[in-house]
Image: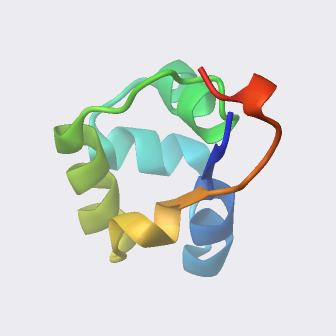
Amino acid sequence: MPIVVDIDVMLAKRKMSVGELAERVGITPANLAVLKNGRAKAVRFTTLAALCVVLECQPGDLLRHEAGDADDEE
């Protein structure tokens, strides 16, 4: 998929664990792992907003478009 999720980068910058982030955002660690590992097909704006508040960042710090093969796009 051409959209890459960079939650790991922000977690490292903030010295925060996945479990702490999940708790503070209000989602399960399993759902955060799906998003973090790029397996999510969608993300709610409320979840994205909560991630930005907790991580003190902008949506563009968490999501980026990476050009690739047309076969990757769905």
Near-viewer residue (11 or 35): 35
Tell me if residue 66 comes above or below residue 55 in the rendering.
above
Instruction: Determine the residue positioned at 36% across, 32% down.
Output: 43
Does 34 sit above or below residue 9?
above
What kind of colouring is applied to the model shown? rainbow
Q: Position of residue 70 (x, y in %)?
A: 75, 32
Which quarter shows the C terminus?
A: top right
Relative horizontal placement of residue 34, taking residue 45 as reference (left or right): right
Relative vertical location of residue 23 with respect to residue 56 in this rendering, above or below: above
- Can you name the residue that lies furthest to the left here? 46
Q: Residue at x 34, y 73 (%)?
A: 58
Which quadrant of the figure contains the N terminus?
Answer: top right
Q: Position of residue 56 (x, y in %)?
A: 33, 76
Answer above or below: position of 15 versus 73. below
Is 70 placed left or right of 46 in the picture? right
Residue lying at the far front of the rendered structure: 70
- In the foreground, 8 or 15: 8
Residue 55 falls in which quadrant of the image? bottom left
Which residue: 66% across, 43% down? 2
Q: At 78% from the left edge and 24% from the top edge, which residue is drawn?
A: 71
Q: Position of residue 65 (x, y in %)?
A: 59, 56
Q: Residue 6: x and y, percent?
A: 62, 58
Q: How many numbered discs, if any?
A: 0
